[in-house]
Image (cartoon, helix red, strand yellow):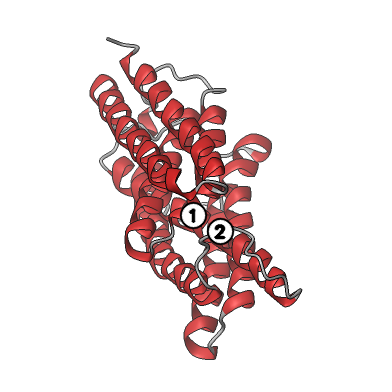
Amino acid sequence: MRDSPELLLYISLAFYLVASGLYLLSLRQSRVRNWAYYSLLGGFIAHAAAIGVRYSHAGYTPITNMHESLSFLVFCLAGFFIYLKTFYRASILGVIVSPVLSVLLIFAFSFSSEIRPLPPVLRSFWLPIHTIFAFVGNAVFLMGFLVSIIYLVAERHIKNKKSDSILPGLPPLEILDLMNYKCMSLGFPLLTVGIVTGSIWAEYAWGSYWNWDPKETWSLITWIVYAIMVHNRLAIGWRGRKTAYMMILGFTSILVTFVGVSFFVGGLHSYL
């Protein structure tokens, strides 16, 4: 039974890989797109079960090391894609999203999946509060990053006066921009709550709300980038390309925070 979380995670990966293949096939045969979505949905359900079983075995929220963090990020990204597909009828984005899910989950398997006792600093009721807000926010911003890339490519495609779409069934630029705004309006408060709860947790753990740890510093930089973007969207009316570039810049900062600091800098928040 100890291996059941990993088995469920492999089943989830298999669903995501099948979804990737079917979404690519749907570029030529659109009728298989529904099957691609159902496969991705199956992966999401199996993934939820894997996280639930791992929680049952570990006794804590399984977002404490790189394997668990990447797995949870994939789960959140899949869930947010399902949300966007439901409300914006943007199933075609699965052509981009499903391979990303597969690659990230494969990357998660490259790290140890052993369930270990928590370090004392992580034994806190703040663990699920801080990490869930932070990683859901990261997943929303990752979706915004992907949508922004698609937006910029589609816009250039249109400006070059090419009649065929880069992806058959791709929503108009206005809808892509609206989806970007949705990512911004959801991701920024999640990021803010993640930073605030992390600061409160730091006071309990280390006796200080802010230690200028590398991950804390880059989290603040990321927050400033997105705060500028939200301000410019609401106060100045930034739309389209400007928002897309800022979303890409913001997620680059998240990558530095999440990956660069953990692998190359270290600090109080490095738990590989």
Judged left or right of residue 156, residue 58 is left
Label 2–label 1 contact, CB within 8 A = yes
- Answer above or below: position of 96 versus 120: below
- Write down the quadrant of residue 107 in the picture: top right
- Answer above or below: position of 239 versus 20: below
- Residue at position x 56%, y 45% in the image: 258
| Residue that numbered label 1 is attached to | 92
Separation of disc 2 and disc 1 at Cα?
Answer: 8 Å
Any part of residue 272 in sight:
no
Residue 130, x across and y down, in percent: 35, 48
Q: Amino acid at mark 2?
A: Pro
Any part of residue 237 in sight:
yes
Total label count?
2
Look at the numbered disc 1 and give the secondary structure of its residue: helix
Look at the numbered disc 2 and give the secondary structure of its residue: loop
Q: Amino acid at mark 1?
A: Ile
